[in-house]
Image (spheres, grey):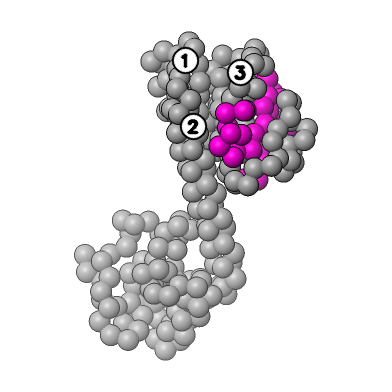
């Protein structure tokens, strides 16, 4: 794996950046790698550069918001091949392609596969910097969402089996009485389990609990009727 200092990166890297973004430059032209690395370091971004996709895969990825600036045409596997490899491995990478040979079909293929941008050479430095900043922001947001989902899974896993059952039925729009009848318990007990589930999930409102359930894939938006509170512990669902 890449270290925080990227000491073992192919061409070396800058470890002095105070920013949280990392740019991985993949280009088989050494001069291009050095020029791009210098450009990104000039705005405070840590960088590491590689001559091929194979080198990048061998070193791995830092656990920080990351953008890959990737030349389409490389010796060996192409940039598009590397993108497909990452996708097949479930690695969601924020990629900005650069190429002096770009055409419409190639650009469309890259964008459909999830690239953030496709920039043709020669390009303005600011255009590339803008694309890289956008890619880093996307990766930052993806990482935040992934972290939040992981926390929700941990909280849900901390519920008892009965608390999970009650939560899943309630977020689907069932009233306390319906949940009680379904599980063979009293409405008062349903209210207790509901309160415990909300506390453990750290949901301030029932609406927040529904959003959490959607994030966890416990319920789909189309499965949830319009919910309107009609009294303490009671809800009325309308189509």
Frontmost residue, 153 versus 10: 10
The image quadrant of residue 32 is top right
Q: Between marks 2 and 1, how big is the CA–CA gap?
A: 14 Å
Q: Give the magenta range.
A: 37-64
Residue at image position (51%, 71%) is: 201
Q: Whole-Å distance between the Cαs marked 3 and 1?
A: 12 Å
The residue at the point 55 percent across, 49 percent down is 143
Q: Position of residue 196 (x, y in %)?
A: 50, 80
Q: Which mark is residue 37?
A: none
Task: Answer with left or right where residue 158 lies relative to residue 9.
Answer: left
User: Percent position (x, y) of residue 47?
Assistant: 64, 34
Q: CA distance from mark 3 to mark 2?
A: 15 Å
For the residues bearing labels 2 and 1, Cβ distance under 8 angstroms: no
Residue 111 shown left or right of residue 76 in the figure: left
Viewed as shown, does residue 4 lie left or right of 80? right
Q: Residue at x 61, y 34 (%)?
A: 41
Residue hosting label 2: 129
Q: Earlier in the sequence, mark 3 or mark 1?
A: 3
The quarter of the picture where residue 183 lies is bottom left
The residue singled out by tag 3 in the image is 32
- Count of all numbered marks drawn on residues in the image: 3
Specify the farthest residue to the left: 239
Between 74 and 81, the one lying in front of the other is: 74
Q: Quadrant of the N terminus?
A: top right
| Secondary structure type for disc 3 | helix
- Residue 185 shows in the view: no
**Magenta stretch contains residue 44:** yes
The percent coordinates of residue 56 (x first, y second) are 68, 28
Residue 122's disc is 1
Q: Are marks 3 and 2 in contact (CB under 8 Å)?
A: no
Q: Earlier in the sequence, mark 3 or mark 2?
A: 3
Sequence-first tag of 2 and 1? 1
């Amino acid at each position: 794996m890449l270290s925080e200092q990227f000491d073992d990166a192919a061409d070396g890297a800058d470890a002095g950046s105070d920013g949280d973004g990392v740019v991985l430059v993949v280009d088989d032209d050494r001069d291009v790698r050095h020029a791009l690395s210098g450009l990104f370091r000039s705005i405070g971004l840590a960088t590491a550069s590689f001559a091929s996709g194979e080198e990048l895969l061998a070193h791995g990825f830092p656990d920080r918001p990351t953008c890959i600036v990737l030349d389409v045409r490389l010796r060996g596997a192409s940039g598009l091949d590397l993108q497909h490899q990452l996708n097949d491995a479930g690695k969601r990478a924020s990629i900005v392609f650069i190429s002096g040979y770009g055409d419409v079909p190639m650009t469309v293929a890259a964008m459909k596969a999830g690239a953030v941008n496709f920039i043709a050479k020669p390009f303005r430095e600011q255009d590339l910097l803008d694309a890289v900043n956008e890619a880093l922001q996307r990766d930052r947001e993806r990482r935040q969402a992934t972290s939040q989902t992981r926390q929700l899974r941990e909280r849900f896993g901390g519920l008892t089996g009965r608390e999970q059952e009650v939560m899943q039925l309630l977020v689907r729009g069932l009233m306390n009485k319906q949940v009680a009848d379904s599980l063979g318990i009293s409405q008062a007990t349903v209210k207790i389990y509901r309160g415990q589930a909300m506390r453990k999930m750290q949901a301030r409102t029932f609406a927040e609990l529904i959003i959490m359930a959607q994030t966890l894939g416990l319920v789909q938006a189309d499965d949830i009727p319009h919910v309107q509170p009609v009294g303490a512990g009671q809800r009325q669902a309308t189509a």
